[in-house]
Amino acid sequence: MKKQFVNLLVILLTASGLLSSCDSKTNRNYGALEFDSIPLNVTEHLFADTAKPACNLVISLAYVKQSTDESLKDSLNTYFLATCLGNEFTGMTPQEAVQQYKEQYVKNYRNDLEELYQKEEKEFGDADQRAWYSYYKYVRSQAQFYKKNLLVYHTRYEEYTGGAHGIYMDSFLNLDLRTLTPIRLDDLFADNYEEALTDLLWNQLMADNKVTTRQELEDLGYGSTGDLTPTENFYIGEKGLTFHYNVYEIAPYVMGGIEIELPYEIMAHLLNDEHKILDSVK
């Protein structure tokens, strides 16, 4: 009897271990990615003269430093470089790309402005013109969300090249790590979802602004610079999808970027996640 009990206990412990192992694999983050960031902050003056206007370039580039899959690491860093800096930098290491981007930015700044500045300085003096020649560009990225098979990469751009004010924008890249492909709305929703999803966006925007009609939203400025429709510039989160509209896309500059978060439960009747992408946030 005692021997039978011991055998049963061994079987139960073994089964428990197998279940625990399966659960651990199910919840493991694909590729065991580890991230790092490359910082850069440089100021360069016209004619390399500190008495002249300057450009300021600030970069904080997030990249994959380590992974259990070297090819996954390289592919992701290629995506990140293309997203943040441009396709021409994808053949480089992240460190090389940041350095090359800096050199190109400074070179373009001087090539574009030095001759014009010299001309206006001789004709008018430079006192009233300095601000128009002082450029800046900030590029900051981060791995915003990483869980199981899903990675969300966020890039923020800010730039001033003269004029009344600078411009800024946010870009989001949702990646299915199993296939290394960007996730689009068509991958998450059933056919012909656009009209119903648009209604949900309007309704959520009304709730966020505590109004009851679209006309009230339009009176506030929404929809004045572009139509409110589902945008591919969205990001996946644990509670829902957030749709990001950059300045001027659906509202004036003064209103800034607009974000509308739709919880999964109110979109359930529209979702058709046949590739189980959203399982990563459950």
Image: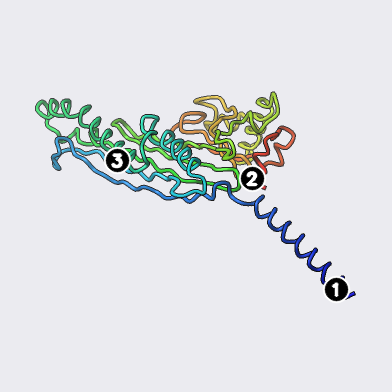
Q: Quadrant of the N terminus?
A: bottom right
Disc number for residue 280: 2
Q: Quadrant of residue 93?
A: top left
Q: Amino acid at mark 2?
A: Ser
The tally of labels here is 3
Q: If you read the primary sequence from the N terminus, does the residue marked by circle 1 or circle 3 appear first?
A: 1
Question: Between marks 3 and 2, how big is the CA–CA gap?
Answer: 35 Å
Q: Nearer the viewer, residue 26 or 63?
A: 26
Please name the residue shown 63% across and 36% down the image: 206
Question: Marks 1 and 3: which is nearer the front?
Answer: 1
Q: Nearer the viewer, residue 262 or 83?
A: 83
Disc number for residue 100: none
Where's residue 77, x and y in %? Answer: 44, 40
Q: What residue would you read off at disc 3?
A: 99
Q: Nearer the viewer, residue 104 or 123?
A: 104
Q: Amino acid at mark 3?
A: Gln
Question: Between marks 1 and 3, how big is the CA–CA gap?
Answer: 70 Å
Which type of secondary structure does the marked residue at label 1 adopt?
helix
Q: Amino acid at mark 1?
A: Lys
Disc 3 crowd, CA 10 A, few/some/many (<14, 14-19, 20+)? few
Which type of secondary structure does the marked residue at label 3 adopt?
helix
Going by the image, does 186 lie left or right of 167?
A: right
Q: Is the C-beta separation of discs 3 and 2 under 8 Å?
A: no
Which residue ends up furthest to the right in the rendered image?
Answer: 1
Please name the residue shown 19% across and 32% down the image: 129
Disc number for residue 3: 1
Q: If you read the primary sequence from the N terminus, does the residue marked by circle 2 or circle 1 appear first?
A: 1
Can residue 210 be seen in this snapshot?
Answer: no
Which type of secondary structure does the marked residue at label 2 adopt?
helix
Which residue ends up furthest to the bottom in the rendered image?
Answer: 2
